[in-house]
Amino acid sequence: MCTLGLLVCGCVHAPSPFAPHRAGSVGTPSRGVLTGGAPLPDQGASYKRLRHNDRRYGLPRFVDAITRAADSVARERPQSMLVVGDLSAPHGGQLLPHHASHRTGRDADLLFYVTTLEGAPVESPGFISVGRDGLAFDKEQNRFLRLDVAREWLLVRSLVDDDAARVQWIFVHDNVRALLLEWAVARNEPPYILHRAMDVMLQPHPGGPHDDHVHVRTACTDEEILTGCEPTGPTRPWMAKGTHDKPQETAELLRMLVESDAP
C-alpha cells in the first residue's frame, strides 16, 4: 500500500492499490522503495555488521550473494571476517545519512579487509581511508594498517563471478582499483574475471572517494524490471541470458589496465 511516508519521500512509483504488481526493489537506487527485503543478520560465520541498526535489508538474492562472497573468502583464507556497513532500511525509501542511494535494497557498503604492517590479518576497525601505497591510519588505536589486497581481490572475484549477484558497479577509489587489478593480473586470473572486474570497479564522480570501503550495486533482473525495478547505468553483457563472456588474452587485458590507469 502507498503510504503518506512513501509519498513524502518522493517515491511516486511505490506499490499501491493502483499498482499492485510493483514489489521488491521499486524505482532507482536513489529514488525508490523496497518491499519484501531480506535482513542481513548481525553476524554470520564469515561476516559481521559494523552497526546494529535497521539498515540491513536488501533484495534476498543480493543479501545471499554477499554472504556467499564472504564465505568464499573465508574458505581460501580461514577465519576471515568481512565487516559490512549499510544496506537499506526495512522499506527503503528514506534518505539515509551519508548516502545518496541505498533506497531500494540494491546497494551495500563492504569495508576493506586489512592486515597489520607485518601482514597479520585483523578485523576492520571501520571506515579508514587507504592511500596510494595501500596503507591506512587507524585513529582509534593510533596505528597504521595495510589493505589486504589478496583477500579484497578474493571478495571482488567472488562477487563478479556470481551470476545471482549481478554486480553492476563496485564503487571504489582508483588507487585501490589499481592495486587489486595489478594483483589479479600478476596471478594470472581468468581473463573473463579480469574483464568483469575492470568493467565494474569505478571511482564515482561525484559520490565521494570510496577509499575506505567498496560500495556494491546489483543490477535489476528481467523479472524485477517487470515489478518496478528501474535499470540505471550500463548493461553488462555477461548478465544476458544465454550469453557468455568473449575470451580475452591476459596480455590484452594488461594493456587495457595500463591504459585505464594512465594520467
Image (cartoon, rainbow, N blue to C red):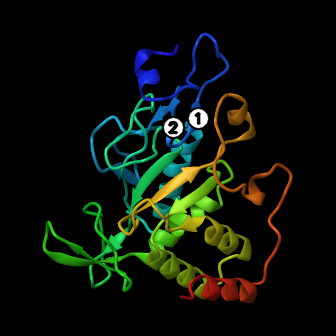
Q: Residue 42 placed where, x, y %?
A: 34, 41
Q: Nearer the viewer, residue 183 or 79?
A: 183
Left or right, residue 79 beside residue 155: left
Tag 2 and tag 1, C-beta contact below 8 Å: yes
Q: How far separated are the C-alphas under marks 2 and 1? A: 6 Å
* Residue annotated with mark 1: 27
Q: Nearer the viewer, residue 191 or 211?
A: 211
* Residue annotated with mark 2: 31
Residue at position x 38%, y 66% in the image:
112
Left or right, residue 71 beside residue 51: right
Q: Nearer the viewer, residue 212 or 261?
A: 261
Q: Is residue 165 above or below residue 248?
A: above
Report which quarter residue 55 is drawn in.
top left
User: Could you tell me the amino acid type at mark 2?
Assistant: Arg
State the residue lying farthest toward the top. Answer: 17
| Label 1 Cα crowd, 10 Å radius (few <14 / some 14-19 / many 20+) | many
Q: Residue 28 placed where, x, y %?
A: 57, 40
Marker count (numbered): 2
Residue at position x 62%, y 61% in the image:
160
Judge whether residue 104 can be spotted in this image.
no
Residue at position x 34%, y 75% in the image:
130
